[in-house]
Amino acid sequence: MAPRISHRIASFIDALPLAPGLRVLEIGCGPGVAAREVSRRVGSGFVLAIDRSAKAIESAMAGSSAEIATGRLRFRQVAIEDFDLLAGEERFDLAFAMRVGALDGRHPDIERRALERVRAALKPTGRLFIDTGHPLREIKLIGR
């Protein structure tokens, strides 16, 4: 049985415009709770969850072996402001972040670089959501 998801995370995920088959990028995945739930909800889609912390990625991978085995969930250690798609990697339909310092307005230079990286990783119609709304807020990406 899957571990319970906090009300905060569940409310955020419920508000995301998820659909089967979407490619989703989670920014700042921590132990992978949201990534596993989003992976379940996009079915045949794909989730890449990133975090700058090696410890967080290690924890997320340890708790996600079944989902990783399906090939529909992967984790990568990288800060969003340094993120690049790998060779041959498809762009994402949607990106989301919960409690991510690089996107909370406190570090404008890092945030500018992070948003550039997100824009480059998303399809032209891709959307970015963060948790500073009730329960989320969409960030309009300049140049879209």
Image (tube, rainbow, N blue to C red):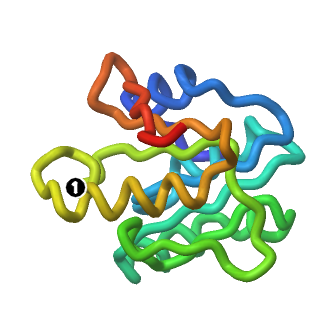
* Above/below status of 124 relative to 113: above
Question: What's the amino acid at mark 1?
Answer: Gly
Q: Position of residue 124 (x, y in %)?
A: 66, 43
Q: Which residue, as the protein is rendered here, is positioned at the far top?
A: 134
Number of marks in picture: 1
* Residue drawn at x 49%, y 39% as measured from the top left: 128
Looking at the rendered structure, the secondary structure element under dot 1 is helix
In the depicted view, which residue is nearer to us: 144 or 49?
Answer: 144
Q: Residue at x 54, y 30 (%)?
A: 13
- Residue 4 visible in the picture: yes
* Residue 83, x across and y down, in percent: 48, 72
Using a 10 Å C-alpha cutoff, classify the residue at mark 1 as few (fewer than 14 neighbours), some (14 to 19) or many (20 or more). Answer: few
Splitting the image into 4 quarters, where does residue 38 fall? top right
Q: Quadrant of the C terminus?
A: top right
Where's the N terminus, which quadrant?
top right
Given residues 76 and 126, the one toward you in this image is 126
Q: Position of residue 47 (x, y in %)?
A: 68, 55
Please state if 140 lies on the left or on the right of 26 as rendered. left
Residue 6 appears in the figure: no
Residue at the image position 59 percent from the left and 59 percent from the top: 121
In which quadrant of the rendered view does residue 30 lie? Answer: bottom left
Residue 52: x and y, percent? 36, 74
Say left or right for 88 vs 91.
right
Q: Which residue corresponds to mark 1?
A: 101
